Amino acid sequence: MISRVERYLAHLDRLSGEVEPAFTPFPSTSPGLGQVTVMTYLDHPSPGYLVGHTYGLSLADHPAWRNGSRELSISVRSTDRLWAMAAGHLAETLRGKCPFSYGSTIDFGEPISTESAMTAFAIYEPTIADPQNFRVDVSPEGHEGHDVINIVGLYPIHDVERQFISDQGLEAFWNLEWDSFDVTRPPAM
């Protein structure tokens, strides 16, 4: 029988074109919940890019999750693994507390990487997959639809952009001129 995590990893394998990830565990600080693991894919989808996916956020519950749990995905033009590790840190420390809903922001509180002044994240749909791949059914065979993971995108942003999103909404920010992969870009406004 294929486990929940094996179903999820098989889905990520299909998305990555069988690129082998590096696995980094984050020990659980939540009683009764397993660890969070980050799968980091270097030079994917192109050389000089990094993609990170979490697993373990979806082991928690949140009252806002009506149509499935969440896992995080980050995709940046960088080879600094700290971007993926930040996703793992957020998943482990905020699971059960943060809904990770589209349009929400998270203040990381310090620069995420030495290569960037960005200190926050916005949550929206992931850029590296087609919409039909955002939803992963990890239910056991014969129980399809009972255990669904929704993959959400984690976008590094500047604090001034986090404040703009808080005031104007994510759509107003998304319509500005900016490159979601560029972690060295100046603020969009």
Image: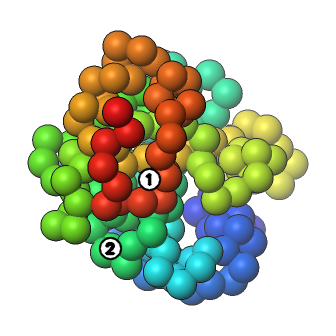
- For badge 1, the amino acid type reads Gly
Residue displayed at 21% across by 46% down: 119
Q: Is residue 113 visible?
A: yes
Please give the residue where the numbered disc 2 appears in the rendered image. 81
Could you classify mark 2 by the number of other residues whose Cα lies within 10 Å: few (under 14), some (14-19), or many (20 or more)?
some
Please give the residue where the numbered disc 1 appears in the rendered image. 56
- For badge 2, the amino acid type reads Arg
Between marks 2 and 1, how big is the CA–CA gap? Answer: 18 Å
**Mark number for residue 102?**
none
Residue displayed at 35% across by 33% down: 189
Q: Position of residue 184 (x, y in %)?
A: 31, 61
Q: Position of residue 42 (x, y in %)?
A: 47, 81
Could you classify mark 1 by the number of other residues whose Cα lies within 10 Å: few (under 14), some (14-19), or many (20 or more)?
many
Residue displayed at 83% across by 54% down: 141
Q: Is residue 58 visible?
A: no
In the structure shown, which secondary structural element does the residue marked by tag 2 occupy? loop
In the structure shown, which secondary structural element does the residue marked by tag 1 occupy? loop
